[in-house]
Amino acid sequence: MRLASSGDIQGMTSPLDTVNSAPRPPRAIATPCVKVCAVDGATGFCLGCRRTLPEIAGWARLSDEERAAIMAALPHRPDPMASLMAGLGQTPS
């Protein structure tokens, strides 16, 4: 009786190989979306996340670096709710 050497088993596959090579679900994409989707006509920014429509529409196609740059800029953008409230003659609380 001859024992298998490492050279004999290199090309063999194990049932675990098919389990480990199964497609993985896509990883989640970071997003500032808070599910309050309404764009202020005066500023062009979403009231919920402060992104523009082109940014929202292209979000999935942007690189991680492009998304990170936009997300870093969001707190520095004007508050679209303030613009909306000013148009109604009110101040945001």
Image (cartoon, rainbow, N blue to C red):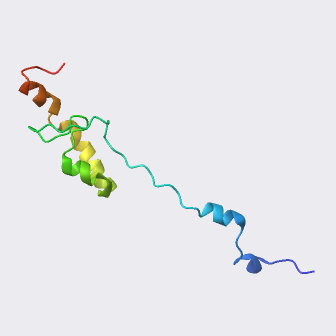
Identify the image quadrant of the C terminus. Answer: top left
* Residue 86 placement: quadrant: top left
Q: Residue visible at 64% across and 61% down? A: 19
Question: Does 76 appear above or below 92?
Answer: below
Residue depicted at 18% across the width and 39% down the height: 39
Image side of residue 91 versus residue 57, left or right = left
Is 38 or 92 nearer to us in this picture?
A: 38
| Quarter location, residue 32 | top left
- Residue at image point 19% right, 45% down: 52
In the displayed structure, 93 sits above or below 8; it is above
Expressed as whole percent of the image width and height from the top left, the position of residue 70 reads 24, 47
Q: Determine whether, in the image, residue 70 is placed left or right of residue 11.
A: left
Residue 64 located left or right of residue 15? left
Q: Up-down: is 74 above or below 68?
A: above
Q: How many marks?
A: 0
Left or right, 17 with reference to 24: right
Residue in the foreground of this view, choosing between 2 and 16: 16
Question: Where's residue 87, x and y in %?
Answer: 6, 27
Q: Nearer the viewer, residue 25 or 1?
A: 25
Which image quarter is the N terminus in?
bottom right
Return the x and y of residue 68 as percentages of the image width and height.
30, 48
Residue drawn where x is 74% and y is 80% of the image: 7
Q: Residue 79, can we see it?
A: no
* Residue 51 visible in the displayed image: yes
